[in-house]
Image: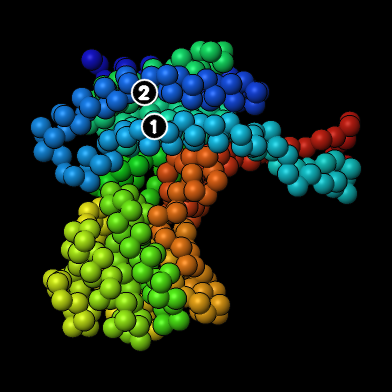
Amino acid sequence: MDVSSYMAELGQTARVAAGKMAAVSSAQKNQALLATAEILESRRDQLAEANQKDLAEGKAKGLEAAMLDRLELTPGRIDTMIEGLKQVAALDDPIGVINDLKYMPSGIQVGKMRVPLGVIGIIYESRPNVTVEAASLCIKSGNATILRGGSEAIHSNQAVAACIAEGLAQAGLPAGAVQVVKTTDRAAVGQLITMPEYVDVIVPRGGKGLIERISRDAKVTVIKHLDGICHVYIDADADREKAIKIALNAKTQRYGTCNTMETLLVHAAVAQEVLPELEALYAEKGVELRACQRSSEILERCVAATEDDWSTEYLAPILSVKVVDDLEQAMAHINAYGSHHTDSIVTENYTTGRRFLTGVDSSSVMINASTRFADGFEYGLGAEIGISTDKIHARGPVGLEGLTSEKYVVLGDGHIRQ
């Protein structure tokens, strides 16, 4: 395959489709989403069969457990894909909405209309459910998309792509609205991120190396997050039962996700009380604890944390633990070592909680909740195209509105400028 020609063809097709998608009615877009949901439901066996091929090949290649976990399409994850499509269909369509319309002294009316971004290139690793999440949001927001999944998920992604293609066809939408790259050649990524004539935005979802490479080499605007070094801070005024439950869930509910806690911070006043109980619970789950000097004096089964541990996204049953003197020290640690993704405080002190909300510079900041809630599905966005740690255009889980822009509109009645 001539990758350069192939990617140019995808880009041209997407550009044409984007022009058509910008004018498609909400009803037609919703029809495509709901049809795709029904097709996924009817093809569970085919999806599972394709996924098993990917898992078998991944194990043969020696993929790490965290990667295999992200790759697996369990029945529950297929349920979530289907429910996500239905949720996105139920969301208000942002396209065409005019905000802030007001009269000017000249008599004209000026407002801002929400419009699609155009063609969105999405590059992701492992998780085939991203194919559905990304496609659904791009369809509903009137964009066209080119999806490039990881080579380890090629069979799963193509099976999902076939379902989406049929859903688009049933609704009479252009096939080029959602295109999944068929080649596993890495040169396809290099082409996708350097086609500004066809692609308006790139969204990378994957490891730090992938995202750093795309951010460095792309000639197209990038919406990104580098990694998910998330924290839970147990304050001196924390409810002990809540603290134990949140700290356990944030780390062990799933290991291979970007919103999983990687560092636990504990106030010195309660460390002796909560750390031994948490240590026992983590031991049951097989979690290795990497501790600072003060926490190692309390914990019985741990290894000494290195400086690198505080800035490492493990995506594995490993947790860094540090005892801090106060809220200010906890926030300083988070802002210095975190990735501005998601951080949570456990406290019953209203003032302390409010200070944490304003003092922690992350895309999601929480009080008395697990960091695992930081995703588009849980935030009511239906799905997400990624979690952005950027500060311009979109921040946090990127849903429908994050895939749109605004343009000024002017309404007049023969007005001329004097």
Residue 43 falls in which quadrant of the image?
A: top left
Mark 2: few/some/many CA within 10 Å (<14, 14-19, 20+):
some
Residue 15 percent coordinates (x, y): 49, 22
Residue 336 falls in which quadrant of the image?
A: bottom left
Mark 1: few/some/many CA within 10 Å (<14, 14-19, 20+):
many
Q: Please name the residue shown 48% across and 40% down the image.
A: 383
Residue named by callout 2: 44
Q: Is residue 115 visible?
A: no
Amino acid bearing label 2: Arg
In the displayed structure, would residue 28 be above or below residue 103? Answer: above
Classify the position of the N terminus by image quarter.
top left
Tag 1 or tag 2, which sits nearer the N-term?
2
Residue 145 percent coordinates (x, y): 45, 28
Residue 354 is tagged as none
Decide which of 204, 74 is in the foreground and name it: 74
Is mark 2 in CB contact (under 8 Å) with mark 1?
A: yes
Q: Please name the residue shown 16% across and 44% down the image.
A: 64
Q: Is residue 362 left or right of residue 139?
A: left
Q: CA distance from mark 2 to mark 1?
A: 8 Å
Residue named by callout 1: 78
Amino acid bearing label 1: Ile
Q: Please name the residue shown 73% across and 39% down the image.
A: 98
Helix, strand or loop status at disc 1: helix
Classify the position of the C terminus by image quarter.
top right
Decide which of 253, 337 is in the foreground and name it: 253
Residue 17 percent coordinates (x, y): 52, 19
Q: Please name the residue shown 48% across and 56% down the image.
A: 391
Residue 141 percent coordinates (x, y): 57, 33
In the displayed structure, would residue 86 be above or below residue 351? Answer: above
In the displayed structure, would residue 32 be above or below residue 94? Answer: above
Helix, strand or loop status at disc 2: helix
How many badges with numbers are in the image?
2
